[in-house]
Image: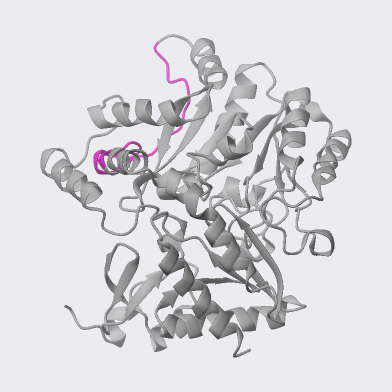
Amino acid sequence: MQQLNANSLEAFWMPFTANRDFKKKPQIVTGASGMYYQMNNGHRVLDAIAGLWCVNAGHGHPKIVEAIQKQAAQLGFASSFGLGHPLAFEYASRLTSVAPEGLDHVFFTNSGSEATDTALKLALAYHHARGEGQRQRIIGRQRGYHGVGFGGLSAAGMGAHKKQFGMLLPGAAHMPHTHDLARNAFSRGQPSHGAEIADTLEQMLQTYDPSTVAAVIVEPVAGSTGVLVPPLGYLERLREICTRYGILLIFDEVVTGFGRLGRPFAADRFAITPDLIAIAKGMTNGAVPMGGVISSNEICQKLMETAPQGTVEFSHGYTYSGHPLASAAALAALDVYVNEGLFEHATLIEPVWEEHAHALKAVPAVVDIRNIGLLAGIELGEEVASGKAMAKKVYDFCFERGVLVRPVANTIVLSPPLVISEAEIATVFSTIAAGLKTL
């Protein structure tokens, strides 16, 4: 293994990282298998965050590895601009077969950020094709996260991610978030209170004029802000309002797709069909970068039928859209998810996950616990600043003892591989409990 020194660390400008702090005390991953990372100092760490919400089948799954190796030897790259290769078409067909009914087409990207930007552009292009090009406003949600492209960042509602970049795109507006500690603290699954928060969308439409709104974009479960689970009835109301006013509803399922909630998509779990679904992360089990947008037939066909014959119907795309290695990895990952019953395993083990998470309720520093599927957020501290310091301290404690969690502001976020066992769940939460006792 190559030895790292200060000079070899300097060139890489790391994303979403305090670079100066990291390079004083680097944490370097050198390998991974199943539920565990291997560090360069020999430390073995149980991965309780699935890499970054994405390694749903566990690290280094042999069937996914084999598929990538085989494809690399056969065809490493082919452009999707006017050409094609078999696996991209095969994967699109397989993916739509497990997608919600009526979502029949896939546009491939390389990441979740590109997926959300693509979904927003599809919404604008669709309305333009319908002769309603005045529909240009995008409505997101406070505390929403939709990647770091200009479109997704403009629609998102996390101010810390925006402050360096000025006004971003015009025309974005934001609904209130659904987090309600006073009424919903320590809810198990969907909170009982808050469906009426969706009615603020109706109020916003009267302010902005619904005929100017192209799309509403939300995460079914808001992930990066600390696991905010939608109240009962909330998503249903959003769907009804959007339908009534001819507004497209976009689900950002970059986190929730591919089994995180025990179903192929959160749309399945909540029995609500959006018009577009943005996907990435678990798509290839994190093994090769890939994202995409699953579109309703209506949107695709409208763009096809209104473009003159022989012209490009949607002027958008990426060099690596439908990349051969990504397609191979995605096909193999989907086979693993379906054939090895990982969605079903996530459903079966969810009650165990929930019980262990809520066993932390009595700890004084814990002000809320939120969970659904194999997701959990443990909120700390009566105010964000002190809670943030607590979360970082718990992260350090757990990492030193061989468990990787994710501190997000004042919340410990958990999203393990779907293959996690009951014993590993117990290890994760007993280690967190021990860390909380040091606060």
User: Is residue 274 rendered to the left or right of residue 420?
Assistant: right
In the image, 345 versus 308, the foreground residue is 345
Q: Residue at x 49, y 49 (%)?
A: 348
User: Is residue 166 rendered to the left or right of residue 116?
Assistant: right
On whether residue 403 falls in the magenta region, the answer is no
- Looking at the rendered image, the quarter that the N terminus falls into is bottom left
Q: Which residue is drawn at 43% across and 20% down?
A: 312
Q: In which quarter of the image is residue 273?
A: top right
Residue 164 visible at all: no
User: Is residue 298 rendered to the left or right of residue 141?
Assistant: left
Q: Quadrant of residue 98?
A: top left
Tell which residue pokes out farthest to the left in this image: 73
**Where does the image place residue 340, in percent across and percent down from the top left?**
32, 44
In the image, 133 versus 104, the foreground residue is 104
**Where does the image place residue 321, in percent across and percent down from the top left?**
35, 37
- Looking at the rendered image, the quarter that the C terminus falls into is bottom right
On whether residue 323 falls in the magenta region, the answer is yes
In the image, 387 versus 246, the foreground residue is 387
Q: Does residue 223 sit above or below 428 in this rendering? A: above
The kind of secondary structure the magenta stretch mainly shows is: loop
Q: Does residue 84 sit above or below 394 in this rendering? A: above
Residue 25 visible at all: yes
Give the number of callouts. 0
Q: Residue at x 48, y 42 (%)?
A: 279
**Where does the image place residue 113, in percent across and percent down from the top left?**
50, 49
Which segment is the magenta one?
A: 310-328
Q: Does residue 275 sit above or below 435 in this rendering? A: above
**Where does the image place residue 251, in percent across and percent down from the top left?**
60, 39
